[in-house]
């Protein structure tokens, strides 16, 4: 009796395996493109003025050692809510630099600016909504005896 039930069970499993491969939908061949007539092209005059865009990063200066600051520029990496952070890491100038202005320029040329005022501290940052491709960041500092100088100007890829 056990042999018969074992044979029936194996036969049933074999039949199920055999028919399982046959129940899938047949593959449909890829659709072939039918040529369609192309209308003649019309020429549109090209405007010679293009948007300014991000521009190219320019030269930067270095703060004197007694006013030095280090900065960190990074993106959050989320394409659903893209942000670029500009932060102060620290340095001798935390108590002396009066203002730190961060400017973000998107590929279409839109500028956003935020200022960090005294008292400065390590970890102080500002955030900007940004492009998910690439952005340009400029950082300007104002220090006594030095004035306002650009200390950072780079293209920052969105990662």
Image: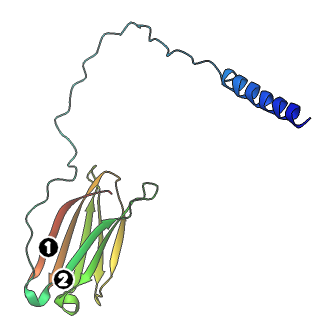
Task: Provide residue 135's location: percent of width, then percent of height.
Answer: 27, 57
Position of residue 88 relative to residue 111, above or below, is below
Mark 1 crowd level (few <14, some 14–19, many ≥20, 10 Å Cα): some
Circle 1/circle 2 CB separation < 8 Å: yes
Q: Residue at x 25, y 52 (%)?
A: 109
Which of pointers 1 and 2 lies earlier in the amino acid sequence?
2
Q: Looking at the picture, tell me which residue is in the foreground, 29 or 64.
A: 29
Residue 97, horizontal then vertical, whole percent: 19, 87
In-image side of 126 versus 67 (left or right): right
Question: Taking 130 as reference, is 9 left or right?
Answer: right
Q: Position of residue 141 (x, y in %)?
A: 18, 78
Could you tell me how far apart the alpha carbons at marks 1 and 2 are, in whole angstroms? 9 Å
Residue occupying the point 20% across, 49% down: 52
Q: Is residue 52 left or right of residue 22?
A: left
Name the foreground residue: 37 vs 89: 89
Residue 31: x %, y % from top left: 50, 14
| Picture colour scheme | rainbow
Q: Is residue 127 above or below residue 13?
A: below
Q: Which mark is residue 101?
A: none
Q: Where does label 1 land, which residue?
A: 151
- Viewport quadrant of the C terminus: bottom left
Which sits in the foreground, 133 or 33?
33
Residue 144 visible in the picture: no
> Which image quadrant is residue 8 in?
top right
Residue at image mark 2:
69
Q: Is residue 35 above or below residue 100?
A: above
């Amino acid at each position: 009796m056990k042999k018969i039930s074992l044979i029936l069970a194996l036969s049933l499993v074999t039949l199920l395996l055999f028919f399982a491969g046959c129940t899938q939908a047949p593959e449909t061949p890829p659709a072939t493109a039918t040529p369609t007539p192309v209308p003649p092209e019309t020429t549109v005059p090209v405007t010679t003025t293009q948007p300014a865009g991000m521009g190219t990063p320019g030269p930067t200066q270095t703060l004197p050692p007694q006013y030095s600051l280090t900065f960190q520029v990074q993106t959050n990496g989320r394409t659903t809510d893209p942000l670029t952070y500009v932060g102060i890491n620290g340095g001798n100038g935390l108590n002396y630099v009066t203002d730190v202005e961060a400017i973000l320029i998107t590929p279409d040329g839109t500028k956003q600016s935020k200022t960090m005022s005294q008292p400065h501290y390590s970890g102080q940052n500002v955030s900007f909504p940004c492009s998910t491709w690439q952005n340009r960041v400029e950082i300007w500092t104002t220090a006594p005896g030095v004035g306002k100088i650009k200390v950072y100007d780079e293209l920052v890829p969105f990662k």
